[in-house]
Every structure is written in C-alpha cells, then in structure tokens.
Image: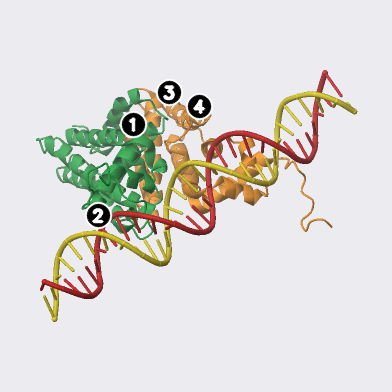
Chain colours: A orange, B green, C red, D yellow
Amino acid sequence: MPDTTERRPYHHGNLRTDLLDAAERSLRARGAEQLSLRDLARDVGVSHAAPRRHFADRRALLDALAESGFRRLGEQLRAAVDEIGDEDDLPARLHAFASAYVRFATENAALTELMNSSKHRPGATAVAEAAAATFGQIGDLIKEGQERGELEGDDPAETGLVIYATVLGITSMLNSGMIEPARLEGLVGTAVTQFLRGARPAEPR
Amino acid sequence: MPDTTERRPYHHGNLRTDLLDAAERSLRARGAEQLSLRDLARDVGVSHAAPRRHFADRRALLDALAESGFRRLGEQLRAAVDEIGDEDDLPARLHAFASAYVRFATENAALTELMNSSKHRPGATAVAEAAAATFGQIGDLIKEGQERGELEGDDPAETGLVIYATVLGITSMLNSGMIEPARLEGLVGTAVTQFLRGARPAEPR
DNA sequence: CGGTGAGAGTAGACACTGGCAACATTGTTG
DNA sequence: CAACAATGTTGCCAGTGTCTACTCTCACCG
C-alpha cells in the first residue's frame, strides 16, 4: 500500500465547486478577511497553486461567492413572497419579503457583508447583474400594488429601492453590532408599516 | 555627511496621529483591504515595528480610524441640522440630515464601509459608543417632531433608526455599485418624503 | 547634578500569504 | 496513437503581521 489515504486521482474532478463550498464554510467561520486560498486548497486536499486554474485571483473567488449568494438570496426572497398565497395582500407580501431578507442576512452575515462590499472586480458585471435581479423583485411587487391602487407614487423601481435599502441598512447595523438582535423584529415591522403608511393613497379608507 | 536627509530625531514626536493621517490617505486611495502597517510606517519614515507601540494590532488601527470617522460624521450631521435655522421645519432638517450623511458617505466611501463593517474588536466599545452617539442624534430630531405633533408613532429611537438605516442602505448600495450616482439625489428625496408621509398624524390638515 | 527607568523606535526572525513560472499528469480528440 | 489542452504540482519571490530582543532618549528623583 503506497499511501495511507486512498489513492487520490491526479485530477480532482470538481475542484471549482469544492473550493466554493470550502470557501463558504471558511467565510462563515472566520469572515472574508481571514479567508486564504492556500487554506482552501489544503481543506480540499490539493496543492496551493491549483485554485489558480479556476479563479484567477482571490478577488475572483470572492466575487463568485458573492454572485452565488445573490442567486440564493433571490430564490429565498421569491419563495417567501410566493408562500403568501394571497396575491392581493400586499402588506403581507412585503413583510414576508423583508423578513426573508433579514433571515438570510443574519444567517449569512459574512456572506451578506461580502455581497454589499464595494470591492468587486471593476469588470465583474456578473455580481452586479445578480444583485440587480435580486432587488428588482421588489420593484415588481410595488408595481403590482400601484396597479391595484393600493400604493401611489412615482417610479416603482425607485420606491422599491428605498424599501430594499432600508432592510439592507437594518441588517447592516445589526451585523456590525450597532443594534441588538432583540430589536430586529420590531424594527423590521415598523419599517414596513411606515413604508406602507407613506405609500398609500392620500385618503385613508 | 552621515545621511542625505536632515537628521531625524530618534523619537518621532507624534507618531500616532501621523500614522492615523497616513492611514486615512491610504484608505482613501486603496481601500481598507490594501492598507498595510508596514506601508504606513514607510510613509511616515519610521521602522516597520514602530506602529506596534501605538496600535497593538492592524485591527486596532482600523478601529481607531472607524471611531474617529464616527466622530467626524457626527459633527457634520449636527452642523448640517443646525444650519437649518428654523427649528420648526422638521422636513427641512431631516432632509439636511440625510443629505449630510450621503455627502459624507460618498466623499469617504472606504471609511464608511469600514465603519459599517462587522469586524470590530470584540471588546472595542469605543467605536460602538461613537456610532450610537452619532445616530442617536436623529432620535432627538424625531422626538422633537413628535412633541410638536408633527409626527406620530411609538418609540422615537426606533423610528429614527429606521430612517438612519434607510440612508445607510442607500449609500451602501451606491458605494457597492448597485445604483448609479445619478439616482442618488432622487432616492434620498423619496426616502425622506415617504418617511414623512408615513409618520405624519392620521388626518392630513 | 547624574543615574536610572520607562517610553518610544529599531533590527531581525518567523510563519504565513498571494501570485508567478516551469513542469507533470491526465483526458480527449483528430 | 500522438498531439494537445486542461488541470495539478513544485518551487520561488516579494510582501505582510506579529513577536522578541536590543537601543536610544528624556524626564524625574536621589
């Protein structure tokens, strides 16, 4: 028996995905700053230069991580909204959206920070597109609301962006320790409520 | 002649402040990630281990930077609000507050990102306190508004946090390239307007 | 005075990192 | 089956943060 471990083939097979998996674990455990390519290579059982075949750069790997993060976030947001069966209940859907975002951001704090970080590749349109697709969803929600007359206002995309930014800001403050977790629930509630009050047509009922 | 440069005294005199200044320049030029202690030491003309006498750690220096950032931001916000002479014009004051925040965050993008980063020292209460003091200001603004009956709502601190989070989120999205600079102005406007509409007492006049 | 610490800066070492180049091993395909 | 493109490997380099041991200076105290 030549080596103690079972014979590992020269070609790993799916290094790229395995690296991303390891990267996500590392991200969760120690944050983006501490993430080391060589560390990941060791985790996966491959030489220190192997990752370079799949990611030109440390940044490139982080960008890939961010992009997949946006995709997953997008799915979860969509699922949360769709789960509210009643298509007419805009408040409920908005609330579901916000809650889902907050849940994702707290369960994946380091990932979320990475996604919102400014240091993406200059040319990396992929992550920007994924981000746009993600928060474009809420624009659709708003538009529907406006078409049914539940909301007024100008540009639905603009209105959507504002509420998206609000939730993003809340989670950012939470993850940076500026607000206590206990206040989260209430904060999101008032944010959505305030927003709906502000966006409803002039005459109440 | 022993050295070409004029005789530099063994003791630098005010290394700490000079390091922080150099750090801020580096931050502005190349971001927090690229900031290197040895680089700063070279900039200031001191040996690579000298910074350690003033900052136990790279993190410690970044924390100090963040803390001073919060202090400066706080001053600018206060000044902007005070500049609106009319104490009764809450919308104007709110708008001034938001605009001042956005200006700071765009003019000091990397610093702002650092301030909102989650990776502060576990024990570093200083930065947390500075942050709290900063966005506590808006709570006061809200409270005044409520006392004069211009606003309704529950906890003024909570309401204040929501609007603060909104502006923070908008600038975060801007700095990470999710929204174009051109939309900034409009976004902040609708954010404040929406907020005021949502927070005003039930019967419009 | 004059010596003696404590504070502040220096020099060197260590373990680590990301990136590069040259080489080795595969799977594929003409 | 030979050539080739992918994919991994080894070795190297410049840089970094941190630690330890040493040196310089100044202020204070006997």
The disc, 4 or 3, on the residue closer to the chain's N-terminal end is 4
Vertically, is A147 above or below B38? Answer: above
**Where is residue A170, by image quadrant?**
top left
Q: Nearer the viewer, mark 1 or mark 2?
A: 2
Q: Position of residue A35 (x, y in %)?
A: 52, 48
The residue that appears at 38% across and 36% down in the rendered structure is B30
Chain for disc number 4: A
In contact (CB < 8 Å): disc 1 and disc 3: no
Same chain shared by disc 1 and disc 2: no
Vertically, is B114 above or below B102? Answer: below
The amino acid at mark 3 is: Glu
| Mark 1 burial class by Cα count in 10 Å: few <14, some 14-19, many 20+ | many
Q: Which residue is mark 1?
A: A199
In contact (CB < 8 Å): disc 1 and disc 2: no
Q: Which residue is mark 3?
A: A147
Q: CA distance from mark 4 to mark 3?
A: 32 Å
Query: Helix, strand, or loop for circle 3?
Result: helix
Q: CA distance from mark 1 to mark 2?
A: 65 Å
Q: Position of residue B156 (x, y in %)?
A: 24, 48
In contact (CB < 8 Å): disc 4 and disc 1: no
| Mark 4 burial class by Cα count in 10 Å: few <14, some 14-19, many 20+ | few
Q: Which residue is mark 4?
A: A125
On residue B10, the disc is 2
The amino acid at mark 1 is: Ala
Q: Nearer the viewer, mark 4 or mark 2?
A: 2
Q: Position of residue B82 (x, y in %)?
A: 13, 39
Chain for disc number 1: A
**Where is residue A85, by image quadrant?**
top right
The disc, 1 or 3, on the residue closer to the chain's N-terminal end is 3
The residue that appears at 30% across and 47% down in the rendered structure is B65
| Mark 3 burial class by Cα count in 10 Å: few <14, some 14-19, many 20+ | few
In contact (CB < 8 Å): disc 4 and disc 3: no
